[in-house]
Image (tube, rainbow, N blue to C red):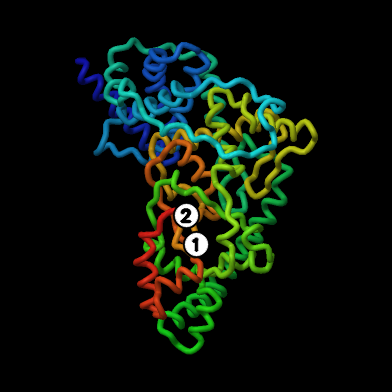
Amino acid sequence: MTNNASTAVVCADLADALNACADGTLAGLKTLAMQALPGLVAVTQQYVEAHEEVEDIVHDTLYLAWQNAWRFDAAEELPGHWLMHILGNRLNSQLSAPYREAFDPEASGYNHLEPVELPPPMERHETLATHRLWNLAECLTPGKVSDRLRTRLTEAFEVLSVQSQMPLTPSGENADPRLFDPILAPRMRLSRLSLRTKQHVDQYVVQPLANSMLTIWMHQLPGAQHIERWGLPRHSVEARFQQALDIEVTPRDLVRNMNYPRSFPDRRVRHGINKRLLWDGDWDQRLEYFRASRRMHFITDIWEHRRNLCNSRSYHQLAERLAHGNPIASHSDGIMLDRPERIHAYLRRYVLYMESMACFGFDNQLGKDPLAAAVDRNGGLVKINKGLHRLAMAQVLGIPRITIRVRGIHHLWWQQVTAGTTGIAAMERMLAALPNCPPSR
């Protein structure tokens, strides 16, 4: 058989395996590992000497391929090139990661949150270009797969095989077997029942009423002025105009974010504000600097320590809580961080999400909700809850553009852009002005 013929057979096998992965078939991942492992190991060893790092890179490449197999299109790209694209990004991440010493709470201002200094945007070196890695893989002798890597992959397969059998979190995802503890199950079931009941009430009672309110206001029927003073039903506006409420921005330009308790001290107002599109008051005068937020510090910390997460401040803090008998436990997420290996797996989950974002770009469809923002009285975009971790990841990685959805508008800016119009005309004016809203400074 000629080299070209053998390459075609390998490509066909890889394509079938990736398509099986996209269908969620674990056998496809095992076939993919069997076909690709020797080549991945051989290429990785050309750039990395430490065996542990080689194993990490190859393991993560296969994991990212499994998670993103739905993106693969055999009509657009060769499967080997697609895999090498992932490997190149993972190698780039490893080679650009700084070496950090273990976190020392005495020497680093343990409780003081100052604005983080963002690293330069991730750039992939030309030596890690996809075609170069593919050509290299074809020239090299297949690498030897260590017993430790085989064992690690077997354990990963076992975790994935039980994933679909895990209890559901309140929002409907299967709990992560590496982080779940059976003690969480009763509260998870109760919370899921409560959430589904609320969703049914919203779907069959609240939302129809809100849709009627929006129709009344749009056509300026009796009661329209009262509905606008109340703030307009946000969910109905979003369902009707969702794409028109989406704005593309440079993530690092979003520097201000809202702290709900600080912006809305009255709990009654705070709990009802997300039902409204128009927000009154001085909420936009009590904003925070996003780069000094806890989420920003968390994401920056684990990304800087991605070579060894046990050296990170986040690992130290979670381990300290565990040592004091107060481990993180969340029934809403289905996680219990009551063991060091669970803490490590929890942090690794965020790092792998960032590896995926660095490789495939920002995908707004992957989160539970779109990234959300509000427009302040001056027409500036302010980050609000929903997607704060994802925004921090995009800023740290230097992602060039992301899409955010406007879910709140200061009444003063609304009055300025609508210029006395009402109903459909006012909505059209507001939607036309949204794309020109810059991030608030």
Q: Are marks 1 and 2 in contact (CB under 8 Å)?
A: yes
Residue in front for this viewpoint, 138 or 363: 363
Q: Residue at x 40, y 52 (%)?
A: 403
Marks 1/2: CA–CA distance? 8 Å
Nearer to the camera, 70 or 110: 110
Q: Position of residue 294 (x, y in %)?
A: 61, 42
Residue on which the image places disc 2: 440
| Disc 1 element | loop
Say if 156 sits above or below 360 in the image. Answer: above
Q: Amino acid at mark 2?
A: Ser
In the rendering, at what x and y percent does residue 378 appear? 46, 63
Q: Which mark is residue 255?
A: none
* Residue occupied by mark 1: 376
Instruction: Classify residue 102 by image quadrant.
Output: top right
Position of 8 relative to 219 (above/below): above
| CA neighbours of label 1 inside 10 A, class few (<14), some (14 to 19), many (20+) | many
* Side (left or right) of 166 relative to 32: right
Q: Position of residue 200 (x, y in %)?
A: 58, 67
Residue at figure coordinates x 40%, y 47% from the top left: 250
Looking at the rendered structure, the kind of residue marked 1 is Asp
From this viewpoint, is residue 203 visible?
A: yes
